[in-house]
Amino acid sequence: MLLNKLLKTGERPRPPTLSYWRNPGLLSIALFLGSTVYAQSDLGIAQYNSSNELLYPANLDEWIQTGASLGGEYSDNAFDPESPGNIGIVQMEPTAYRYFMQHHSYADGTMFLLSFYKGEGKSEPQLPGFVQGDLLAQEIHVIDKARFTEGRGFFLFRTPAPTSSVKVADGSECVACHNEHADFDGTFSQFYPTIRAHLQD
Ligand code: HEC
């Protein structure tokens, strides 16, 4: 969400201040905890560079679609059927999706992607509705109770050719809204048919 903001703001969130490399003791504690406490539930699919930036996943075309929305970006204007705004597509990383289907919970490293496409009308052969036009921007939500103090990290990717992204700083409106309004573990499962059906089993 917050596409307008994402497209307009040039601000880059600050990277985390804790440096394992300046304190080898911290690194060994982290590795120890990582290998004992969290190994079972960490999918290891979210990849980071040495600056803790999330690498843009290479296999997004294989991710599973969980939801779609039209005109979901924030605006003070009323919804206009002639110009309904962007189409938002939500996808989930496939290993994380399979884990969720089996356990009814998210493993550490679970990733959701929200991509915004231009809503395009007047397509040929003419149908009265709207189809996906150009890709405008993407956001990834990583759920990871071991890695992030807030239990989740949000990352913004601009097009074209994104490579990596700094985590949105703690205390963001992303985390606040998701924690307050999303139905399941900070994700808007209420809008994702396969996910919500599975939670009702
Ligand atoms: C005021 C509420 C609100 C805020 C603030 C918000 N979101 Fe969301 N977000 C939503 C809603 C509602 C959805 C459901 C999908 C849709 O409607 O497009 C969603 C879905 C998502 C998803 C898909 C996975 C999921 O968690 O359900 C991602 C990724 C995402 N948002 C990223 C972000 C990022 C990054 C920010 C901050 C820059 C942010 N959101 C801020 C309301 C919000």
Image: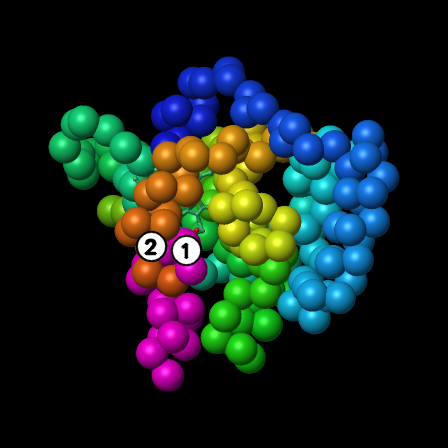
Task: Determine the residue positioned at 85% across, 39% down.
Answer: 24
Quadrant location, the N terminus: top left
> Within 8 Å: ligand 1 and the Cβ of disc 1?
yes
- Residue 6 in view (yes/no): yes
Q: Quadrant of residue 99?
A: bottom right
Tell me the colour scheme of the image. Answer: rainbow
Question: Position of 102 compared to 1: left or right?
Answer: right
Q: Amino acid at mark 2?
A: Ala
| Magenta range | 185-201
Q: Position of residue 64 (x, y in %)?
A: 54, 61
**Residue for point 18% across, 27% down:** 76
Judge: label 2 CB < 8 Å from ligand 1: yes
Quadrant showing the C terminus: bottom left
**Mark 1 residue element:** loop
Name the foreground residue: 143 vs 93.
Answer: 143
The reply to whether residue 1 is in sight is: no
